[in-house]
Amino acid sequence: MPPVADQRPAVQFVTLGEDEAGQRLDNFLLARLKGVPKSHVYRLLRKGEVRVNKGRAKPDYRLQAGDEVRLPPVRRPEPGAPTGRGRSAGLELEGRILHEDTRLIVLDKPSGIAVHGGSGLSHGVIEALRAARPDAPYLELVHRLDRETSGCLLIAKRRSMLRALHELLREGRVEKRYLALVKGRWEAGQVRLEDRLRKTVRGGERVVTVDETGKTAASIFRPVEIGSAASLLEVRIMTGRTHQIRVQAAEAGHPLAGDERYGDRDYNRKMRELGLQRLFLHSASVGWEDPVSGEWKMYSAPLPEDLREVLSRLESHHG
């Protein structure tokens, strides 16, 4: 028999670049040692098997450019092996990339997949992409979309891009526009809605309510097409609160079509008869001034076929 190759992983030494500086050591390790249980990573730190510049370092140590990190040999699952479904989902998502460069991916997220795993889900968009790209050094969500919401989703390929976009988001300098179908005839024209929204749990389910103790949420609702049964709106959000558009639309008396949490049950039943199988909310475009070049960047995702068909049926029924 031929000798079996030694499969044991080797010690690695990683020198930090400017792009990776500033992050905590434990977060750096969790990103580098994908697939290794978090408890094991912290055990390696406690035992001193991870070294920074040949010395022990605490989990909250902030890495500096030029630091040399010793990564001990650890066995990891083969790339993509533990989540075959995640890998195949990732390959499907590759076909939905609207734009990619060295710093960023703009993805047209399909409805029905969460942006990250958890809550009983084995994988989400970010896990699926990592499984499809096992050699990618860095992939992180810039922001989130609800599981049922489709459209533009930003994924950073560099930590510096993540930091820059997070700063723009905090300052309200990222322009995010959605298309939403709401119940009834929208009579208000273009209007800016401001509410205070607070997360709470009701009946074991996480919900968002309008509450004076909550955080301010601001959106601009603009009608695109107005009908007697439903109105198509473009919504520009000025803040990024959980379920913001859904709660504000319901509060205004025009809940989103297909919204099982904040919507109108009878109306949703009628919309299902027209073929609507999910929440009618689509992240149509996202834009910002590029922090490096100063150019205005704008990316858009077309309205999915299933939602276009619903609009067509609405027109023929009520046109």
Image (cartoon, rainbow, N blue to C red):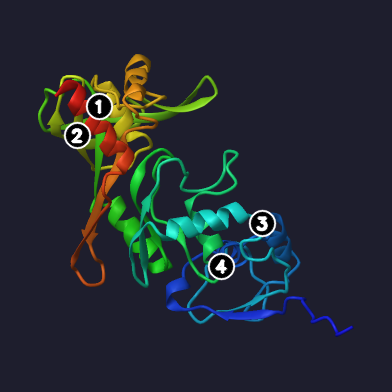
Nearer the N terminus, badge 3 or badge 1?
Answer: 3
Say which residue label 3 marks.
82
Say which residue label 2 marks.
233
Q: Is residue 162 left or right of residue 29?
A: left
The span from disc 4 to disc 2 (Cα, nearest Å) is: 40 Å
- Label 3, residues with CA under 10 Å away: few <14, some 14-19, many ≥20: few
- Label 1, residues with CA under 10 Å away: few <14, some 14-19, many ≥20: many
Q: Is residue 309 left or right of residue 67?
A: left
The image quadrant that residue 186 belongs to is: top left
Say which residue label 1 marks.
182
Would you place residue 297 above or below residue 205 in this image? Answer: below
Nearer the N terminus, badge 4 or badge 2?
Answer: 4
Nearer the N terminus, badge 2 or badge 1?
Answer: 1
Q: Which residue of the protein is positioned furthest toward the right in this rendering? A: 1
Q: Amino acid at mark 4?
A: Pro
Q: Are marks 2 and 1 in contact (CB under 8 Å)?
A: yes
Q: Are marks 1 and 4 in contact (CB under 8 Å)?
A: no
Q: Is residue 67 left or right of residue 195?
A: right
Q: Residue at x 56, y 49 (%)?
A: 123
Q: Which mark is residue 134?
A: 4
The answer to whether residue 123 of the structure is visible from this angle is yes
Q: Amino acid at mark 2?
A: Leu
Quadrant where the N terminus sits is bottom right
The answer to whether residue 230 of the structure is visible from this angle is no
